Image: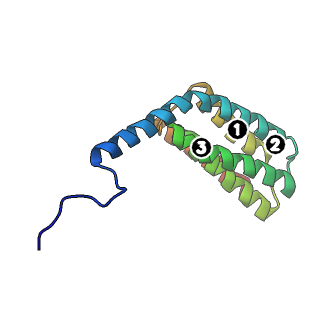
Amino acid sequence: MTQSNSKPPGTTSDKEFGVAVASAQAAVAGLSDKYIGWVNDDLKRLDAAIAGVTDGANADALRAVYGVAHDIKGQGSTFGYHLITDIGQLLCRYTERAIEHKKVERAVIDAHVEALRTVVDNRIQGPAGELGREIIDALKGVAERSFA
């Protein structure tokens, strides 16, 4: 029995695959500049959702905050803004817990939004090393203390 090195019809060569991957990476890189505009629009939506949140509990307003935070976290890493994804995830967790505990501190939400704005305004891409860890640790701490 002889083995054939030919590929089944409809499959691509390694070279064609490499070209397709490079093309997709270039497309994402081209959208990266637009992402800052998109995330700033999302931050405006987040501000509008937060306007309904007061200290205490307002499940509908918190669900609106969660929805926008979820959108923000879903896009960050795609465009190289890993901290945006991480902060968005923390904000999602905080709003879930706030709904569950029927308790929210607006200052905790505001701290997350301020952190998001700092990352966007300063174009902090990647995991940001020690700075990124400090931001995440500080947000986790303030969220935990709010439920203590």
Count of labels in the image? 3
Query: For the residues marked 1 and 3, what is the alpha-carbon distance in whole angstroms?
Result: 16 Å
Answer whether labels 2 and 1 touch (C-beta < 8 Å): yes
In terms of secondary structure, where does tag 3 sit?
helix
In terms of secondary structure, where does tag 1 sit?
helix
| 10 Å crowding of disc 1: few (<14), some (14-19), many (20+) | many
Q: Earlier in the sequence, mark 3 or mark 2?
A: 2
Q: Position of residue 142 (x, y in %)?
A: 66, 47
Say which of 89 and 100 sits in front.
89
- Between circles 1 and 3, the one closer to the viewer is 3
Residue that numbered label 2 is attached to: 50
Location of residue 23 (image quadrant) = top left
Q: Amino acid at mark 3?
A: Gln
Q: Residue furthest bottom?
A: 1
- Between circles 3 and 2, the one closer to the viewer is 3
Q: Residue furthest left?
A: 1
Q: Is residue 115 above or below residue 8?
A: above
In terms of secondary structure, where does tag 2 sit?
helix
Q: Amino acid at mark 1?
A: Val
On residue 113, the disc is 1
Q: Position of residue 78 (x, y in %)?
A: 52, 42
Residue that numbered label 3 is attached to: 75
